[in-house]
Amino acid sequence: MKTKILFLIFSLFTAVAWADSFDLGSHGTLNLVVPETWSVEGHDIKGMGYDLEFHVKKSAKTAIQVTLLYSSKDTPRDEKSTEAEFTRNCGQFARASVEKKVAIKKMELKAGFGYYATFTDESLVGKPFVPGNFKTMTPGMMVLPPDVVASVTIFAEDTGSQAFTQAVTMIQSTTLTPSPNPPATAPPGK
């Protein structure tokens, strides 16, 4: 009986998902696991990267914006300098947030590394939800070897919601399969 109840509870909180892939040409293929309850749209940013937007199909209370940018393999990114850059960039959000500070969390990626932090807009606390005006914003930054840097933003009404948990899980499922024909690197000094 106990096993059946645990299985039923687990089933209620588990969403069916599918793997989605985006062809980044010579930069590889971006792969991630998208819950069935989400939709995704993507488009190429001519030669510079790729934009993705994710939305919960039956709710306007959570959304994700991802911008992938192609970087030069000649400009390696290490974790320490990336974390410092991300922390500096988040300072502006902390000042207008309930948190008043940047609390960095490390992304759990299969390959590469990334960071994120959540900020609550103090001007929206206690107010009813208005579509497109989210109480929380969770910016993130991922480095996916060999040459993709991603800016991620999760917009959510409630960071305790199932949709927010799915959003974080989805982003952390991101992998980059290298292209068999990687982009040519510029000769030294160019």
Image (cartoon, rainbow, N blue to C red):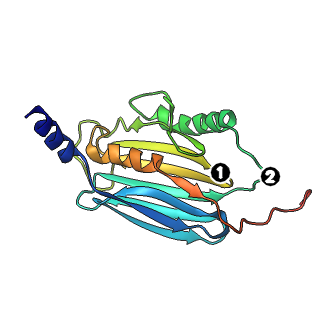
Q: Would you place residue 153 above or below residue 48 in this image?
A: above
Quarter residue 56 falls in: bottom left
**Residue 175, position as x, y percentages in the image:** 53, 53
**Left-right relation of 32 to 78:** left
**Residue 50, position as x, y percentages in the image:** 56, 64
Q: Amino acid at mark 1?
A: Pro
Q: Amino acid at mark 2?
A: Asp
The residue at the point 51 percent across, 31 percent down is 104
Q: Nearer the viewer, residue 106 or 175?
A: 175
**Residue 115, position as x, y percentages in the image:** 54, 38
Foreground mark, 1 or 2, reads 1
**Residue 92, position as x, y percentages in the image:** 53, 37
N-terminal label among 1 and 2? 2
Looking at the rendered structure, which numbered label has been put on residue 145?
1
The residue labelled by disc 2 is 74
Quadrant the C terminus occupies: bottom right
The residue at the point 37 percent across, 38 percent down is 121
Quarter residue 126 falls in: top left
The residue at the point 33 percent across, 43 percent down is 165
Q: Nearer the viewer, residue 11 or 75?
A: 11
Quadrant the N terminus occupies: top left
Q: Residues within 10 Å of mark 1 (few under 14, many from 20)?
A: many
Q: CA distance from mark 1 to mark 2?
A: 12 Å
**Left-right relation of 73 to 45:** right
